Amino acid sequence: MKEPEANRGEAAPPKAWADAGAADGPRGRAIPLPSPIRFTRAICGDLAQAERREWWLANGLGGYAGGTVAGSLTRRYHGLLIAPVASPLGRRLILAKADATVVADARSWPLFTNRWKGGVVSPAGHIRIGSFHLDYSTPVWTYELGDQRIEARIWMEPGAHTVYAAWRLSPRPQPEHALSLRVTLLANDRDHHGTMAVGGFAPEIAVEGERLSLTDQAGVALSIRAPGGSIVPKREWYRDFALALEAERGLDAIDNHLCVGEVTLPLLPGQWCGIGASLNGDPAADLEAALGRRLDHDRRVVSSAIASSPAMRDAPPWIARLALAADAFIFARPLASVPDGQSVIAGYPWFGDWGRDTMISLPGMTLATGRPQVAHRILATFASFVSQGMLPNVFPGAGDRAEYNTADASLWFFEAWRAYFEATKDVAALRAVFPVLSDMIDWHEKGTRYGIAVDRADGLLKAGVAGVQVTWMDAKVGDWVVTPRIGKPVEINALWYNALRIMSTFAATLGAPDRFSAAAEAAKRSFARFLRADGEGLYDVIDGPNGDDASIRPNQIFAVSLPHSPLAAADQADVVQACRRHLLTAYGLRSLAPGSPAYHAHYGGGVLERDGGYHQGPVWPWLLGPFCLASYRVTGDARAAQDLLVGMRDALEDQGVGTIGEIFDGDPPHQPRGAPAQAWSVACTLDAWRLLRQAGHGI
């Protein structure tokens, strides 16, 4: 993957549930709540620490909101409402900020922070943050103004392009003077990957009572409502926001937003006041009820996950937190052939839905969280895009064509179906998809796009053509394929063998002829060619243009972690030991062993530096789950393997709070890098924990 350039489960548990510890769920069952994530003044008042930590929300439709604990903007993608105005994922920044200032007579106290070109930070509202925490997925700030406390929250309406920002004054002590809240509304209409020039956005602005409506030539119609307040329309550009993280990425880092209005609200003890903004008509006037809907949704997600299996019923709070984090990546992708189609956002904020990431994430996203019906909808959605035996790498947008430059997405599709059928025993679904899966095997045997075909000489799968990268190590800068893997990549052949064995089992289940076992046996015999004579595991690629690639990479772990392994037990142990010795960290596996000539200890810099080092050393969290499963297979010690996952708990309190990001530096202290929220990082950790708990408890 490469960064771009320039409804579920049981009825809601009682609202009395707190946001830490455990509570009684449906039918009196104790349900662990998501692990409490809370930062106090030491972090919130330190701008570097408060900007490093980001909150992210999603609405199940591909829309999202995100920002920093400090309240400042550090990414192009930060904002209160980013929505796919062009279906399905033409996401645009619509509402950037709602900056609140407390007013008492002639005095005022800003509760927000802004960074400007030239390094100026003004105002520095983060110094008034006494604490920040997550209430389920909802970010919560507590501001301190003398002896007064003001709670602030931001949340999205599930299933709608609607966001709310609300504030509440603590009921005690009573303020000496009447307080009001002034909220400055900064809007935009630009691609979420870009920036806006001054004057580049000229909407019509109208105010009627407590509502402001905004429309522009592109057809965007935003309704902002301030229940019990008044709104004054404005048209003033706020220029030169400095986006520090974009500057680090070597991209355009100056943005501009249009102030479209100013809201005045009474700030009364114990009462919510605030704004709602929506692309779906007028947002609700009852802020407390809107917040309740968000929390009820989150409670259902956690309740469904915890009730889904015996293994999950005694899950610790950090696993409950991961189950909630998983929900943010699933979104609706309706198709003519699958009206209730769904898919998985690979990561926030810049990824769309990728075939490879979706199939790898599916068991953890859906089966470990008690949503097999969602798994089936995702599988059905992708099945409709199978072409010449291949799943798309990148899903098409409206009017676009799917891109099929992937050798592994199609093979992960078989594993996703295996996991789904094992969990559901849905014979009808299997019978319906079996011809599609059989045809996919046929295409791989006779040859499909990008040189993907079985080599008749040894039964292994070869893949790749010059100038195209078709495995998950797919960074490319211009014409430079950073990690070319033309030949027979080790994980592609582990997946190929696994797929053939899966199809053999499926054929037996359906009473169909088994024409897959012979091919599997041939692949297994030849897989021994990957074994290194020095005992350091497996070659990464064999039969490449320059011979065999002896780079020590994590791709070999799948020859042990997948349900069907082509290796003997002793060889499996060598693979796990090699990965443990060279690649294992607390947050995942390095993509290349330290000491290799191409190893990058740290990930960063401009586009060329970042993409040049993307798969040359950074730690990938999604690989920790497969490593732990492989370790268990070799040692039989499920508890020890599960204990390796616990280090991931710390990642929930850094970068994207409450979730797990894309990568970490290869060298200690393994700083988080890349996208702050990544689907397969969350899903593979969650699913491995579930499977190891099942194994360790014999359930």
Image: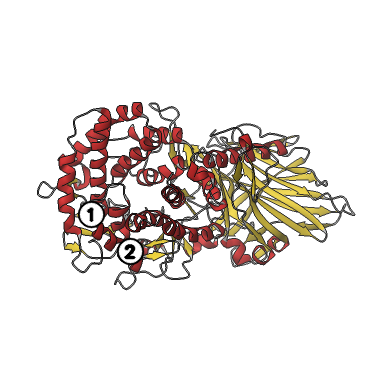
Q: Position of residue 52 (x, y in %)?
A: 56, 62
Q: Quadrant of residue 551?
A: bottom left
Instruction: Please state if 646 lies on the left or on the right of 355 as rendered.
Output: right
Which image quarter is the C terminus in? top left
**Residue 462 appears in the picture as rendered:** yes
| Residue type at numbered disc 1 | Leu
- Which residue is at 78% across, 44% downward? 265
Q: Earlier in the sequence, mark 1 or mark 2?
A: 1
Which mark, by number, is residue 421? none
Residue at the disc numbered 1: 567
Q: Observer-nearest residue: 521 or 193?
A: 521
Label 1 neighbourhood size at 10 Å, few (<14), some (14-19), many (20+)? Answer: some
Q: Is residue 112 above or below residue 204?
A: below
Which residue sits furthest left?
A: 457
Instruction: Please state if 619 lies on the left or on the right of 8 as rendered.
Output: left
Instruction: Please state if 265 lies on the left or on the right of 236 as rendered.
Output: right
Q: Is residue 255 above or below residue 235?
A: below
- Which residue is at 80% across, 57% downward? 108
Label 2 neighbourhood size at 10 Å, few (<14), some (14-19), many (20+)? Answer: many
Which residue sits furthest front?
A: 698
- Which residue is at 27% across, 34% downward? 506
Badge nearest the viewer, 1 or 2: 1
Report the number of discs.
2
Q: Observer-nearest residue: 54 or 177?
A: 54
Residue at the disc numbered 2: 579
Q: Position of residue 373 (x, y in %)?
A: 45, 32
Q: Position of residue 686 (x, y in %)?
A: 46, 49
Which element carries disc 2, helix, strand or loop? helix
Q: Is residue 16 above or below residue 673?
A: above
Q: Observer-nearest residue: 99 or 371?
A: 371
Instruction: Please state if 247 lies on the left or on the right of 525 as rendered.
Output: right
